[in-house]
Image (cartoon, rainbow, N blue to C red):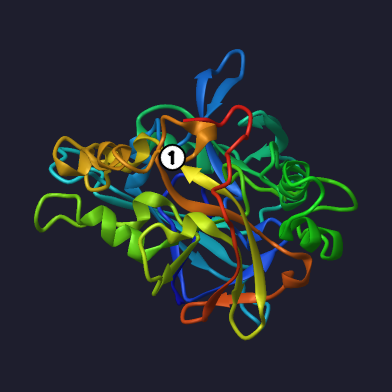
Amino acid sequence: MKISQLYVYPVKSLRPASMTEAAITRSGFEYDRCFMLLKVNDENTGDFENMHVSYYAELTLFLTDLVLPSEEGNDSGRIRVTYQSPVSSDSSQGRKTLEIPLEPDIQGLRELDIVMHESPTKGYDMGHEYNDWFSECLGYRVILAYLGQNRRSVLGSLSPKAAARKQQNANGGGGWLSMVMNSVPLLGGNGGDEGQITFADCAAFLVVSETSLHNVSARMAEGEEVDIIKFRPNIVVSGSEEAFEEDFWGELTVGDEKVKLLLTANCTRCQSLNIDYTTGKFGTGESGKVLKKLMKDRRVDKGVKYSPVFGRYGFPDQASNGMTLRVGDEVEVSKRLTERTTFDWPGLAY
């Protein structure tokens, strides 16, 4: 098996930047989901809500591209966001572009209290220049929030340490993951904490399989193919022998550097699969039936029994800090599970 595609989502819920390689940090790929849009509900009270693509389908009309910092140091890097008016729209906006610094200076920015899936953190209001641009595109007031050096805690048993404890209790003190975590510290935490993530929903990485995608596309009307982007992956793996065999992947070893990815939970799916990315609305034809087509046989997680599973959440081990994943890297399943994991993040059950 090999890595066939890599994606970074610099602004959560917008379309991703396709990468040929991506650097690993303690909380996932560098620059992944370090910004997020917040909808302003009441400007007088300052009330706002997190914007997730499952509820704000119009966010799929924003394309992103990463311009990485130059080695010479004369370019500190930026995110290029392009708003693309929906197909068959009467809007006169057409295409508009905004550039956002990769690592803004937070001095003087208003601090925000942000709680995402019951995991709190701090963020920074990027100010009128950026807020006004997104607000004009969307037609309502929003805030572009920057995470900075802040992070969120991983809840439930999704972190490798928590997953190891859960397995240890279930097995009476044994299990491969328990042994791994006793000898290899988790990348994403200091000491005994449970790992740290950005504005990603609940894990550092989401790994999906092309073979499983082909299975989903085969369920659609003839000639219809499902875009992998609908599944919001970071890492796409090609070459697996069977569809959905990744349900039982416990650990992946990737590339010449032997990057270790510990896969601890299933990704349970929501209505975001039904969005038509050309209109920025929920689909009315085949594009609006993807979730339903998975309901028949993919509700395989006892923790979220009404939602289908596609893909696996994962975390790097500490030895992988600073390493790089590349398209074309070979992927080995170095640990397999005998039974599926059970999802148990509080406050995140679609």
> How far across and down, in percent of the image, does residue 319 sit?
77, 71
Q: Which residue is the extreme one toward the right?
A: 191
Q: Is residue 299 above or below residue 103?
A: above
- Where residue 14 appears, x then y in whole percent? 43, 48
Residue pointed to by mark 1: 134
Q: Secondary structure at mark 1?
A: helix
Q: Please name the amino acid that badge 1 sits on.
A: Phe
Q: Residue furthest bottom?
A: 256
**Would you say residue 284 is visible in this rendering?**
yes
Left or right of 87: which side holds 139? right
Please tell me which residue lies in front, 20 or 85.
20
Q: Residue at x 26, y 43 (%)?
A: 290
Q: Residue at x 57, y 55 (%)?
A: 338
Q: What residue do we see at 71% from left, 32% from top?
A: 120
Label tally: 1
**Seen from this angle, which residue lies furthest left?**
222
The 10 Å Cα crowd at callout 1, few under 14, some 14 to 19, many 20 or more, is many
Does residue 38 appear anywhere in the picture? no
> Is residue 339 found left or right of 192 in the rendered image?
left
Q: Pick the quarter of the image with the N terminus.
A: bottom left
Which residue is more in the foreground, 225 or 167?
167
Q: Residue at x 29, y 40 (%)?
A: 275
State which quadrant residue 71 falls in.
Answer: bottom right
**Residue 47's x, y, as percent?**
59, 18
Q: Name the one closer to the observer, 229 or 125.
A: 229
- Is 207 situated above or below 290? below
Q: Is residue 67 left or right of residue 16?
A: right
Task: Judge from the rendering whether residue 164 lies leftward or rightward of residue 201; answer left or right.
Answer: right
Where residue 77 appears, as percent x and y from the top left, is 59, 67
